Amino acid sequence: MTFKVKDHYFNKAKKDNFLARSVYKLEEIDKKFSIISKGDSIVDLGYHPGSWVQYCMLKVGEKGSVVGIDIKEVNETLGGKPNVSLFQKDIDTVESIADLGLSDKIDVLLSDMAPNTSGIKSLDQDRSLNLVEKVFELLPLFLKEDGNLVIKVFDGNGAQKFLKEKKSLFKEFHFLRPKSTRSVSKEFFVIGKNFRHDRV
């Protein structure tokens, strides 16, 4: 089953000219929850290789903007697009939107970040949770009032407890495991709609 899923979405991404199969996770989330609109400003954390940037670029149009950051070298195949900026940065070095060349808060914050996995379940869950906590730390600095969030999480007791505490930051708070997720994966996505600055 795992290989069938992999083959189908891997081949579909190649056929549709997307850089990775993960684009279909974001597409499903966006279709279900209407996260991204034309003209939106978006920051994509852990964008590499860039299929989410490609999707966002098409959705926001010329009046929107997409900023991607990743610890990997900038993917030059995405270069030259007027509404896209890419940075090679560690999330831990980002302290404000100005660090990403932005002057205003954004409409949508995306995070597909994952830790380097060790194969030790508890350690990998802890590392993933550290990344999730960092993103939530940045929310009030990055997101506009009523902005939206999509973030990848590795399932575990610590993550569930943390997310429960953060639920009130958004008017809507959803969990989803997209269809294109590999069957062996422990990941799911959290979708926060309509950020509430007064709850921070």
Image (spheres, rainbow, N blue to C red):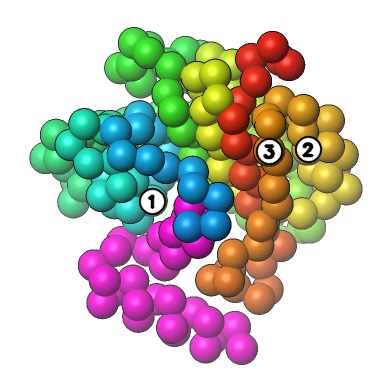
Find numbered disc 1 in the image and state the secondary structure of the residue it sits on: helix
> What is the distance, in whole Å, between disc 1 and disc 3 at their CAs?
22 Å
82 relative position to 127: left or right: left
140 relative position to 125: left or right: left
Q: Is the N terminus in the top left, top right, bottom left or bottom right quadrant?
A: bottom right
Q: Earlier in the sequence, mark 1 or mark 2?
A: 1
Residue 142, numbered label: none
Q: Main secondary structure of the magenta part?
A: helix
Report the residue marked by disc 2.
Answer: 163
Crowd rating for badge 2 (residues with CA inside 10 Å; few <14, some 14–19, many 20+): some
x, y percentage for residue 102? 33, 16
Report the residue marked by disc 3.
Answer: 172
Q: Which of marks 2 and 3 is nearer the N terminus?
A: 2
Say whether residue 92 is visible.
no
Crowd rating for badge 1 (residues with CA inside 10 Å; few <14, some 14–19, many 20+): many
Q: What amino acid is found at the position of numbered circle 2 in the picture?
A: Leu
Report the residue marked by disc 1.
Answer: 52
Q: What amino acid is found at the position of numbered circle 3 in the picture?
A: Glu
The stretch in magenta equals: 1-30
* Quarter of the view holding residue 118: bottom right
